[in-house]
């Protein structure tokens, strides 16, 4: 027990020294080698933990993110190229459709023009036939009108001469009326 009291006294002496110095124990030069040893041990353990566990995990996460970003950029470029090809194909199909529509329109116009030309030719022929028929009827009407005028003129001349008491034969009245009609027409 005496030993125990002596140790206790030594501990009390250290405490008294620390209390008497009034400073922090970390700044006590007597404990520097011990503190440096534990500092080196702590730094080595921290380095080993970081280099063996944490940094490889962080590196793998960064490598995975870089790979994912690279793959996404490559996929985006592929999709962009496919979109450009699809747009070019769309424009080509649109141009082809426009050309086909223009051809159909031109063919339809040509067919309509042919039908129109046939209809116009038919109408012209019908108009020409009706015009010829009308001209023939007009000539008939003129001829009948001329005959009617001649007949009326002969009858009127005979009646006028009879009313004046002059007797004229039909030949002389016809000759006089014909001469008058020819002279009046000229």
Image (cartoon, rainbow, N blue to C red):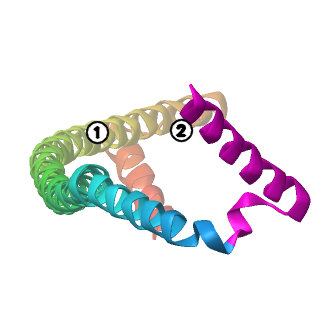
Sooner in the amino-acid sequence: mark 2 or mark 1: 1
- x, y percent for residue 28: 71, 68
Disc 2 secondary structure class: helix
Q: Which mark is residue 31?
A: none
Q: Which sits in the foreground, 80 or 71?
A: 71
Residue 101 shows in the view: yes
Report if residue 121 lies within the magenta region: no
Disc 1 secondary structure class: helix
Q: Quadrant of the C terminus?
A: bottom left
In the rendered structure, which segment of residues is drawn in magenta? 1-28
- Residue 176: quarter of image: bottom left
- Residue 182: quarter of image: bottom left
Report if residue 18 lies within the magenta region: yes
- Residue 69: quarter of image: bottom left
Q: Is residue 183 above or below residue 64?
A: below
Q: Which sits in the foreground, 104 or 55?
A: 55
Q: Is residue 37 above or below residue 153?
A: below
Please indicate whether residue 141 sits to the left or right of residue 28 in the image.
left
Q: What residue sits 50% from the left and 71% below the top?
A: 33
Q: What residue sits 16% from the left and 54% below the top?
A: 86
Residue on which disc 2 sits:
157
- x, y percent for residue 157: 53, 38
Marks 2 and 1, Cα distance to the nearest angstrom? 33 Å
Residue on which disc 1 sits:
134
Q: What residue sits 45% from the left and 56% below the top?
A: 181
- x, y percent for residue 43: 41, 63
Q: Is residue 79 above or below residue 144?
A: below
- x, y percent for residue 55: 29, 57
Which secondary structure is most common in the magenta stretch?
helix
Q: Which sits in the foreground, 93 or 134?
A: 93
């Amino acid at each position: 027990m005496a030993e125990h009291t002596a140790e206790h006294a030594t501990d009390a002496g250290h405490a008294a020294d620390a209390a008497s110095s009034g400073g922090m124990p970390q700044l006590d030069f007597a404990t520097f080698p011990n503190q440096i040893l534990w500092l080196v041990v702590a730094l080595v353990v921290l380095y080993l933990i970081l280099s063996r566990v944490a940094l490889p995990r962080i590196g793998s996460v960064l490598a995975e993110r870089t790979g994912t970003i690279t793959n996404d950029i490559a996929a985006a470029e592929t999709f962009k190229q496919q979109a450009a090809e699809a747009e070019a194909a769309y424009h080509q199909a649109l141009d082809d459709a426009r050309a086909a529509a223009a051809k159909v329109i031109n063919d339809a116009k040509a067919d309509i023009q042919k039908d129109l030309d046939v209809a116009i030719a038919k109408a012209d022929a019908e108009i020409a036939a009706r015009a010829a028929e009308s001209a023939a009827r007009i000539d008939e009407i003129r001829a009948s009108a001329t005959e009617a005028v001649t007949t009326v003129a002969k009858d009127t001349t005979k009646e006028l001469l009879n009313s004046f008491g002059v007797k004229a034969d039909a030949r002389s009245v016809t000759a006089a009326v014909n001469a008058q009609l020819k002279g009046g027409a000229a």
